[in-house]
Amino acid sequence: MPDSLDSFAKVSPISPASHAGVIVAALDMGSNSFHLVAARGFGSSHFEVLLKEKVMMRLGDEVAATRRFSPASQDRILEVVGTMATLARGVGATELVALATAAFRDARNAGQIVDAIEEIHGIKVSVISGRREAELIWLAVSRAVDFGGQVALSADLGGGSMEVSVGNQESLLDTESHPVGVGRIRARFASPKDPSGVDPKALRAFLESELNERLKRLKRDFGPQLMVLSSGSFLNIARMAMIRSYGTAWSEASLNQVSVPQDALASVNADLIRLDSRSRARLTGIDDKRLDLLPGAAVVLDQLLSQVRPSQVLMSEWALREGIILGELAQRSPVEFSGDERSVKEASIVALASRYGWNEGHARQVASLALAVFDQTRPLHRMGTAEREMLYLASLVHDIGEYISVEGHDRHGAYLLENSRLPGFDPEERNQLVSVVRYHRRGVPKADYAPFAALSKEGAAKATKLAAILRLADALDRSHTRLVDRIEVQIQRTQVLIFVDAHDNVELEEYGLRRKRQLFEDVFSRSVHLIQNGREISRHA
């Protein structure tokens, strides 16, 4: 299944890299609870969990009733997000991906709180669609559970929605998102007359209209025999079923990959639906925080089991938060896991350039020419190794903006860099890279461009010099055919001479240099002249 349009999550840098390998954090801002996982990645699909935290929020109940977050809830959201970002930093996470789900999709004032989170904590929150949520859950479930070669249907019941997916171990075949989360159920089908606190009859009627035909279609089209359940409510019901079948040893045991007897699930569901809250509280294994949510979850699970009629029910302890981690690790270059800071920078740049369809031959030719100019003009610019590396990296991505449009690709490239993950770069380096790419084509770096304005005075001066050098190098491959084999640069009192060895006439390069040399000339107070075969071919007007 192709990626959703909203598959690119916002990544918030939260601390500088100081550990070998990759440590990222995922914040699942669910309708019922917020979950944080921080993990150290060892590859694109392998990681070690360093930290897990959960805070019950119960936002789904409120939003289902009012379509808004109350002022108290907004304060609570800000507090919890700030705390979780601090915890993630504490275990060395350098980036945090925060995804918000159904409650944020439904709340009319969600944008207000998302903006406040970014302004106060510097954390960018992506409010994702139900389909994207289902895709990420499936990514986690299909890694956590062995389907035994079967087609599986997975169901994850959250506070605001339930995500249902079908696929095999290798492929996701279909996904759906349904507005039947436990918080939404409690708000919509509350019944003080019924011992369970919800109206089971009305809820079943709603589920029949909302789920039955869709489940029948999934069953008919894909024939899933295996059902995999995830989420807190389903896991709690499964734990109660395992205790009921096999004893209290299952009170703390892991449920991942566990096959739960369906008769035990039905027994637990029946008790949850018929008993009042005081009697439910005495059921072995029940989570007190879910006491009023589980009757609705039990009705939903009954409906799933009756419609799908699986041969086996397995549990997954991985869900959205682990899916976020896996999704982030999958975008990393293998070299990032080595912890070599210099190689991490280059790997992240090459991975980004590849994603946006770079012309690698031209990019590497420009990089080679740029370094040659840099090395031979050191008496002018007086910059060192770090700036040389920055010039090299900027050269590799200077044209990625052409992925959006050739016209204005300097601005487009800077935008892509601003909004992309750049492992290994601190904020000053990131802003310097963005500024060099932004001004590699035309214009004079100005303080009204935010990344340039954010640079230190010294950093801004260096970015301007690097942009001037990059312009010359880019001009020297104006034809994109790598005609120039070698250059020699001579610095004179009032001019810089660039002697080129080329295997053909460099007319386009001469044209490019005439257009792009002005910034270099202004910065270094010397005119630039291009000479081929002993003849100057770039005279000033």
Image (cartoon, rainbow, N blue to C red):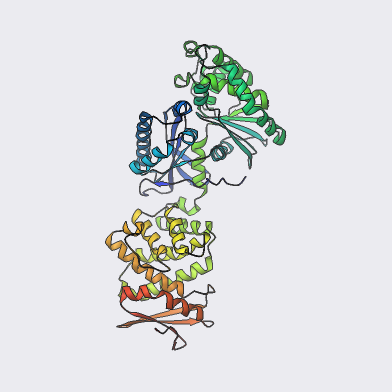
x 42%, y 40%: residue: 111
Identify the residue at image location x=47%, y=64%: 408
Locate the N terminus and report the quarter of the image it occupies.
top right
Report the front residue among 23 and 248. Answer: 23
Residue 150 location, quadrant: top right
Please identify the quadrant where the C terminus is shown.
Answer: bottom left
Across and down, in percent, residue 188 comes to 52, 22
Residue 88, position in %: x, y? 38, 39
Residue for point 28% across, 63% down: 458
Can residue 248 be seen in this snapshot?
yes
Task: Answer whether residue 261 is visible to the viewer in this image.
Answer: no
- Furthest residue in direction bottom, as rendered: 534
Is 112 placed left or right of 232 in the picture? left
Q: Residue 65, position in %: x, y?
A: 47, 25
Q: x%, y% of residue 186?
A: 50, 22
The front one of 286 and 131 is 131
